[in-house]
Amino acid sequence: EEGPSQIFLLPGAGGRAQQLTSTSGDDRWPTWSASGDKLLFHRIVERGTAIKMLDRQTGKVRNLVDESERPLQASVDPRAERVVYCSQTDDRKVLKILDIKTGARRVLPTGPGQACYPRWSPDGKRIAYVGKSDRRWEVSVISPDGADRQILTAGNAELHGMDGPIDWSPDSTRLLFQSDTDPFEARIYVVDVNTRKVEAVTDGNWFDEAPSWTADGKGLIFMST
């Protein structure tokens, strides 16, 4: 539309879109809470971005993280009580957990490298993210308390350029992610969190990215050239 970008809700079967936000700022990157009554999103403000939450019943928007933390991607836990988000410091990107009720926040111990694109698992037990260790980005998981950090794609030589959005399967057992294959080409892969088995789920001379599971776990939605 003319003017700032806004967030719309479109029925899965098609039809008329409903506009959910309307401000002078650009609203982007919407993410649902598990119950569907809260919507986490980013609003581009004068000096960067801020993380907001929309209550669908009241229509009120609450500010969760302001632009001083330079927040990027974020994800809300199943109870919509905590938010994990990527925050840019002077030398790297880190993951922080915000308690929505108290406002308390802490940095997740993801190691000395970069960490971004966090996604809270549907069962609330783990947080997936893309972290950079040594020379490349890797798909990893960590417990919300900072324990049991695991790099799921370590040692897989065919994977490259995995710094992009990821998503959990509804049963919290698998993760979708993108990986470069050739110049200007990428595929969508799935990794089993328990066995670390990696399989390609798209093929062809395209650039496939930003995958998301369907609600029943039988399909996926993604962007492609």
Image (cartoon, rainbow, N blue to C red):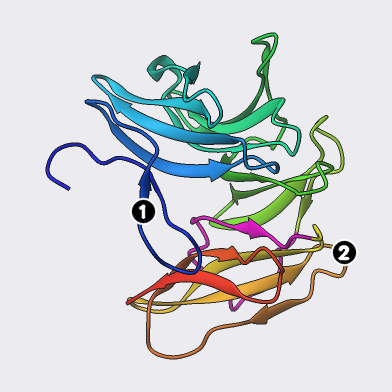
Find disc 2 in the rendering and name its residue.
194
- Is residue 142 something one can see in this rendering? yes
Q: Identify which amino acid the numbered label 2 is placed on.
A: Asn
Q: Could you tell me which residue is drawn at 80 percent across and 69 percent down?
A: 196
Numbered label tally: 2
The label shown at residue 17 is 1
The label shown at residue 190 is none
Is 87 placed above or below 1 here? above
Would residue 168 be counted in the magenta stretch?
yes
Q: Could you tell me which residue is drawn at 53 percent across and 32 percent down?
A: 56
Q: Is residue 174 left or right of 107 when viewed as pictured?
A: right
Which secondary structure class fits the magenta region best? loop
Q: Secondary structure at mark 1?
A: loop
Crowding at mark 1 (Cα within 10 Å: few <14, some 14-19, many 20+): few
In 3D space, how far apart are the residues under numbered discs 2 and 1 (Cα atoms)?
39 Å
- Is residue 159 something one can see in this rendering? no
In percent of width and height, residue 1 lies at 17, 48
Q: Could you tell me which residue is drawn at 74 percent across and 61 percent down?
A: 152
Q: Could you tell me which residue is drawn at 67 percent across and 63 percent down?
A: 215
Instruction: Give the magenta range.
Output: 152-170
Of 147 and 135, nearer the camera is 147
Image quadrant in which you'd find residue 45: top left
In percent of width and height, residue 25 lies at 26, 28
Please identify the quadrant where the C terminus is shown: bottom left
Image quadrant in which you'd find residue 66: top left
In percent of width and height, residue 222 lies at 47, 69
Of 11 and 74, nearer the camera is 11
- Judge depth for marks 2 and 1 and give the one in front: 1
Q: Identify which amino acid the numbered label 1 is placed on.
A: Ala
